[in-house]
Image: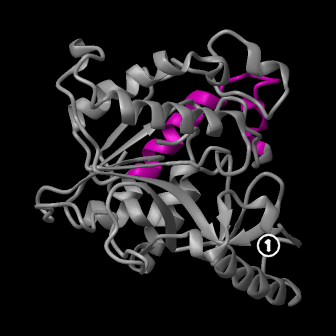
């Protein structure tokens, strides 16, 4: 479950590609078209909301290409394409416009997700933490909607017209352990010191990266190194939003940050075996097998949402 096109590839690209390749059903739900995003390539600057305002449809096509790179065939927009419009950063006028995701009624938006959950019947749901990872209104709203839907979908009295109740086994929030990120930034600064090595001039900071937490908070570590190329290709598909120069990338702020092929999560609902980090989102789910796995995730996925 993700707020905008590109969030899924940055946060969960390797995880999604890994489980899709292993035969899990991966479903991505994206909440908006990302209409308010900034545009990196100057040749596409006319797409921006203050010019042609056609960035949303362009990002739909970028997302389709990214999903092809990850091997994900089931992708939906919450309520249908364009049902909710991208919001801006906190406090801007766009957030109060009719149809803006930030101003949407949470229960109404959650009903759209409940319909998908009851159809797909996922074992795992992946979304953001209560701050949306970094405080963007759409990310916060995506968290609220996902967590609300995760509760409502199991209630037989809630909207029986949307399908039979379904109880999700495990819910995860996207996380990045601080220690891993500090090591990555250390390598990045050394590489930036070598003239001409990278197309970026300056590094981001740890505070620029969503979902960073102290290492013990991370409960689950998915080794996606075998799918790093797929993740990088998916991120490159979002060309209006991301510039990739492995093992680094930058967003429209042009500040480089580490590219992570191993992805990290915090289990917030469901059973965890022992105190060590999990290596599988489906760990501990009774009767799980490669054939019947499901993750629902934004951006996100197995039947993962």
According to the image, label 1 marks what residue? 199
Disc 1 packing (10 Å; few <14; some 14–19; many ≥20): some
Quarter of the picture holding the C terminus:
top left
Image position, residue 134 (x, y; %): 72, 50
Considering every residue shown, the one lying at the far top of the view is 98
Q: Is residue 146 above or below residue 27?
A: above
Image position, residue 103 (x, y; %): 66, 18
Given residues 223 and 21, the one toward you in this image is 223
| In this picture, residue 195 sits left or right of residue 225 | right
| In this picture, residue 233 sits left or right of residue 205 | left
Residue 190, image quadrant: bottom right
* Helix, strand or loop: magenta stretch: helix
Question: Quick check: can you spot residue 267?
Answer: yes
Q: Is residue 188 above or below residue 124?
A: below
Image position, residue 96 (x, y; %): 75, 15
Segment tinted magenta in the rendering? 43-67
Image position, residue 182 (x, y; %): 74, 80
| In this picture, residue 271 sits left or right of residue 269 | left
- Does the stretch in magenta take in 25? no
- Does the stretch in magenta take in 49? yes
| In this picture, residue 18 sits left or right of residue 237 | left
């Amino acid at each position: 479950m993700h707020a905008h096109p590109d969030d899924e590839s940055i946060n969960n690209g390797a995880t999604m590609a890994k489980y899709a390749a292993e035969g899990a059903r991966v479903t991505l739900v994206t909440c908006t078209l990302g209409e308010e995003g900034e545009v990196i390539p100057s040749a596409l600057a006319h797409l921006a909301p203050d010019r042609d305002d056609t960035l949303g449809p362009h990002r739909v096509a970028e997302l389709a290409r990214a999903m092809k790179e990850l091997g994900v065939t089931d992708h939906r927009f919450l309520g249908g394409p364009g049902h909710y419009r991208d919001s801006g950063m906190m406090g801007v006028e766009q957030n109060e416009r009719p149809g803006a995701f930030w101003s949407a009624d949470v229960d109404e938006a959650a009903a759209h997700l409940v319909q998908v959950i009851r159809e797909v019947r996922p074992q795992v749901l992946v979304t953001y933490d209560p701050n949306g990872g970094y405080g963007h209104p759409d990310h916060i709203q995506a968290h609220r909607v996902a967590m609300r839907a995760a509760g409502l979908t199991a209630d037989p009295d809630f909207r029986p017209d949307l399908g039979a109740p379904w109880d999700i086994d495990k819910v995860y929030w996207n996380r990045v352990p601080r220690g891993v990120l500090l090591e990555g930034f250390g390598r990045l600064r050394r590489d930036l010191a070598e003239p001409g090595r990278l197309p970026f001039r300056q590094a981001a900071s740890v505070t620029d990266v969503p979902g960073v937490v102290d290492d013990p908070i991370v409960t689950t570590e998915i080794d996606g190194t075998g799918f790093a190329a797929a993740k990088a290709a998916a991120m490159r598909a979002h060309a209006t939003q991301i510039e990739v120069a492995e093992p680094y990338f930058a967003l429209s702020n042009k500040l480089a940050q580490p590219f992570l092929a191993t992805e990290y999560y915090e289990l917030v609902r469901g059973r965890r075996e022992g105190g060590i980090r999990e290596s599988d989102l489906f760990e501990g789910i009774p009767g799980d097998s490669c054939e019947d796995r499901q993750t629902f995730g934004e951006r996100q996925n197995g039947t993962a949402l």
